[in-house]
Image (cartoon, helix red, strand yellow):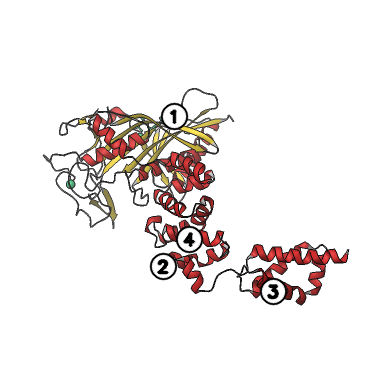
Amino acid sequence: MSEYEAVIGLEVHAQLKTASKLFCSCPAVFGGEPNEQVCEVCAGLPGALPRLNEKAVELAVKAGLAMNCAINNYSLFARKNYFYPDLPDGYQTSQFAPPVCENGYLEFSHEGETKRVGITRIHMENDAGKCLHVRGATLLDLNRAGTPLIEIVSEPDLRGAEEAAEFMRQVHAILVCIGATDGNMEEGSLRCDANVSLRPVGSGVYGVRTETKNLNSFRNVQKAVDYEIARQKARLDDGGAIVQETRLFDAARQVTLAMRSKEDAHDYRYFPNPDLPPVIVDPAKIEEWRAQLPELPAPRARRFVESFGLTEEDAAILVSDKAAADYFEAAVALFPQGRRIAALMRAELLRECEAAGLRADEAKFAPAELAELAGLIDGGEISARTAHEIFPELFAHGGSPASFVRERGLSQISDAGELEAVVDAVLAENPDEAAACKGGKTRLLSFFVGKVMARTGGKANPALVNSLLRARLEEGQSTET
Ligand code: ADP
Ligand code: MG
Ligand code: ZN
């Protein structure tokens, strides 16, 4: 048995967030009644002429700029010939050489190290329709046909399944951040093919790869790559060879299955599409688009760590979702305790958002209200525990947490005199435990904290109760000795 190194390259397909399709004015929206969003161009009728959607070019170029690519002023659309029942043209209209963007890279931190993954190219292409298999018949829905995609091809720079999934997360965060895609993976807006091979550790040449198609979640990327690494390893250890082939991931069974042997590029007989002129992008336009780019996730995470004292983990989670990061900034501007805001967002807001299927900016509970809630906790008005208990209701209706706490009488008791009376009563009612505690059984302290909490309906300020109890019990000790 030899030691192997995994080599992985991803081809990520992202649906661009344009109003209309890539080569016609049909709406590019998900769903709809079958074949309602179809014209002669996207149905591939003979003689129909495609016209390029400028917005798609803008989004592809922005993706290239965000991923440190060189932008080609001149690129071409080609016909990539193959037969598929839901591809009515008989070819996919895709960019071969030159593509609109090439030679970029993405940098991200993974397991404490900075990882750089080369981006070979980003090109535009149209999506196919869908086959629906109904009661023994195959029906065609061409609504998706002609929807604009970019394909982002990475260099084979990834070395593990977790790293591949992390790369996919980074691509997702960037594309959503710049508005290139809606990033809805359940609807297929972002999916990828994973190329995986193994080679002996130390070897300078790549092994034979397989390509597992259409992975539509971060988890499936990781599972499919993991499975493929294990499968190839077992085969090589048995003295077998890896066949270059296209595979499918069966998510239910968590395995990859052979689909077909892999075509080489020449099998597609790529040639420039005579119906489309070259794509010429004015350098001034590129600069205009560059200036429109928002702050990207990676530098934003660094700023969150440096300016607000967040942990790397908190920062990474917030910037992976632009709406969450914007929400954080709005809240922290009003209550400048970054860690408190981040903790509340992770423990409460984002959890509720996820359960409700909402983005942070769609929540009724606004950043100003979260800032106010953070202030109530930091000011000792309520405990983090009370905040947790009332959060679902605050989230459902929005509104001022301070008023909510006042109306429900949930304010913490932070009055030392009032609490001292409760502490004394509780000690007097439990003389045996009090004596044991004074005698050194400090574990019993939490017993008394619990009693005080129960008596005050959970509203006593726990830090204050603790210090009052300790003071009383130490008093007792000094009189004894
Ligand atoms: P295609 O899949 O269309 O034939 P390429 O041959 O350019 O395209 O490769 C596509 C992807 O496969 C790229 O992401 C590349 O990094 C990756 N890749 C190429 N060779 C290997 C290999 N030996 N092992 C793993 N990935 C590879
Ligand atoms: Mg491929
Ligand atoms: Zn159309």
> Foreground residue, 222 or 480?
480
Q: Earlier in the sequence, mark 2 or mark 3?
A: 2
Q: Residue at x 20, y 53 (%)?
A: 35
Residue to which mark 1 is pinned: 208
Residue to which mark 2 is pinned: 397
Q: Is residue 318 left or right of residue 53?
A: right
> Where is residue 249 drawn, in percent x and y?
42, 45
Distance CA(mark 2)–CA(mark 3) = 35 Å
Q: Is residue 45 left or right of residue 327?
A: left
Quadrant position of residue 435: bottom right
Q: Dot 2: what SS?
A: helix
Q: Dot 3: what SS?
A: helix
Amino acid at pointer 3: Val
Q: Please say if 206 is above or below 439.
A: above
Q: Residue at x 51, y 67 (%)?
A: 390
Amino acid at pointer 1: Val
Distance CA(mark 3)–CA(mark 4) = 30 Å
Residue to which mark 4 is pinned: 372
> Foreground residue, 460 or 168?
460
> Where is residue 228 drawn, in percent x and y?
48, 39
Distance CA(mark 2)–CA(mark 4) = 15 Å
Q: Dot 4: what SS?
A: helix
Q: Earlier in the sequence, mark 1 or mark 3?
A: 1
> Foreground residue, 24 or 212?
24
> Where is residue 207 drawn, in percent x and y?
46, 28
Counting other residues with Cα less than 10 Å from the Cα at mark 4, is it few (<14), some (14-19), or many (20 or more)?
some
Distance CA(mark 4)–CA(mark 1) = 58 Å
Residue to which mark 3 is pinned: 422
